[in-house]
Amino acid sequence: MRVKTNVTIRIDEHLAREAKILAASRGTSLSRLIAEELALLVSKDANYQRAARQAIKDIRESPPLGYEPVSRDELHER
């Protein structure tokens, strides 16, 4: 069982009113709407971080491409 905690946030009055309307139109509370959106945000960030770590690992472990670097002067020889 997860323990829940209360969090206090300060937002613009107009935003709060619009958010309450949005929550009501979705048949949920403002608290649940915010909690679900935060959970989604945290999950997306965790997935991004995991993917970034894997990409860096893949790059470091990839075999050499088998070419020699070319200098700028060699590229621009005429």
Image (cartoon, helix red, strand yellow):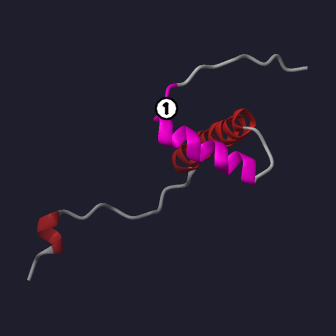
Q: Quadrant of residue 2?
A: top right
For residue 28, side relative to residue 54 (left or right): right
Residue drawn at x 71%, y 32% is 31
Quadrant in which the N terminus appears: top right
Residue 76, x across and y down, in percent: 12, 75
Q: Residue furthest right?
A: 1
Q: Is residue 51 visible?
A: yes
The span picked out in magenta is 10-25
Residue drawn at x 69%, y 37% is 30
> What secondary structure predominates along the stretch shown in magenta?
helix
> Across the whole image, how many numbered discs are drawn on residues?
1
Residue 24, x across and y down, in percent: 74, 47
For residue 65, side relative to residue 73 (left or right): right
Q: Mark 1 sits on what residue?
A: 11
Residue 69, x across and y down, in percent: 29, 61
For residue 5, side relative to residue 2 (left or right): left
Q: Is residue 18 highlighted in magenta? A: yes
Quadrant in which the C terminus appears: bottom left
Residue 59, x across and y down, in percent: 52, 50
Q: Residue furthest left?
A: 78
Task: State the SS at label 1.
Answer: loop
Q: Quadrant of residue 32?
A: top right
User: In the depicted view, which residue is nearer to us: 23 or 17?
Assistant: 17
Q: Is residue 31 above or below residue 23?
A: above
Q: Amino acid at mark 1?
A: Ile
Q: Is residue 67 above or below residue 7?
A: below
Residue drawn at x 46%, y 35% is 12
Q: Is residue 26 highlighted in magenta? A: no
Q: Is residue 57 visible?
A: no
Q: Residue furthest bottom?
A: 78
Label 1: few (<14), some (14–19) or many (≥20) C-alpha neighbours in 10 Å = few
Residue drawn at x 82%, y 16% is 3
